[in-house]
Image (cartoon, rainbow, N blue to C red):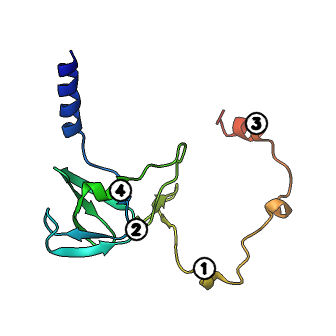
Amino acid sequence: MAFVLLVFLVAFSFAAPASGKVKSKRGDIELSKARGGSDMVCTAGFHDEMQLLQTEDSWALVKASCGQGWVPMGDVERVQAAAGDKSMQLDQVDVLGWIDNPSAVFVLDNNMNDFAGVNIDRDFKEYLQHTMDREQMEMKNNEN
C-alpha cells in the first residue's frame, strides 16, 4: 500500500504544471540560456518576482523583468500570496471597460503631476433638488 501511495505521489508531482511566482533565496540570481549555467542572459535582483514557466530535473525556466532563462531550483523559492489576499496586479494590463452606450472607458495611469490643482472631492448633495426613495423609484421603473 505504501508503495502505491509513493508511486501516486511521484506521478502527481511530475503531472503538476509548473506555474506561479518565484524569487531568489540568496540575493541576485543569474539567468542562463541553457540548463547548466552557461551563457548568462541577465541578472535578476533579490526582490524581483519571476514567473515560473517550466521545471526540469533540478532546473527552473523563469521569466523575469530583465529576460527569460534557467536557474537552479535550489536558488529560488515560491512566493505565496497572503491568506485572504484578493489583490490583482495590473502592471502590464490595459484596462478597458464598456458602459451601456457604446463607448470605451479607459483607466488612465498618467503622471499624477499632470492633475495638480484639480480637485475631485465633491459632495453632490447640493445638486439634488428633492429626495428620492429607492423603493419608490424601483417600483416606478419596474425594477423590483
Q: Earlier in the sequence, mark 4 or mark 3?
A: 4
Q: Using the image, determine if residue 126 lies above or below residue 17.
A: below
Whether label 4 touches label 2, CB < 8 Å: no
Residue 95 horizontal side relative to residue 134, left or right: left
Residue type at mark 1: give it.
Met
Whether label 2 touches label 1, CB < 8 Å: no
Could you say where residue 32 lies in the image, as x and y percent from the top left? 19, 69
- How far apart are the two marked residues, 4 and 2, measured between alpha carbons? 11 Å
- How far apart are the two marked residues, 3 and 2, measured between alpha carbons? 56 Å
Secondary structure under tag 1 reads helix
Residue with the mark numbered 1: 112
* Mark sitting on residue 22: 4
Secondary structure under tag 3 reads helix
- How far apart are the two marked residues, 1 and 4, measured between alpha carbons? 32 Å
Could you say where residue 71 lies in the image, as x and y percent from the top left? 24, 62
Residue type at mark 2: give it.
Phe
Residue with the mark numbered 2: 46
Could you say where residue 31 lies in the image, as x and y percent from the top left? 24, 69
Residue with the mark numbered 3: 135
Q: Earlier in the sequence, mark 2 or mark 1?
A: 2
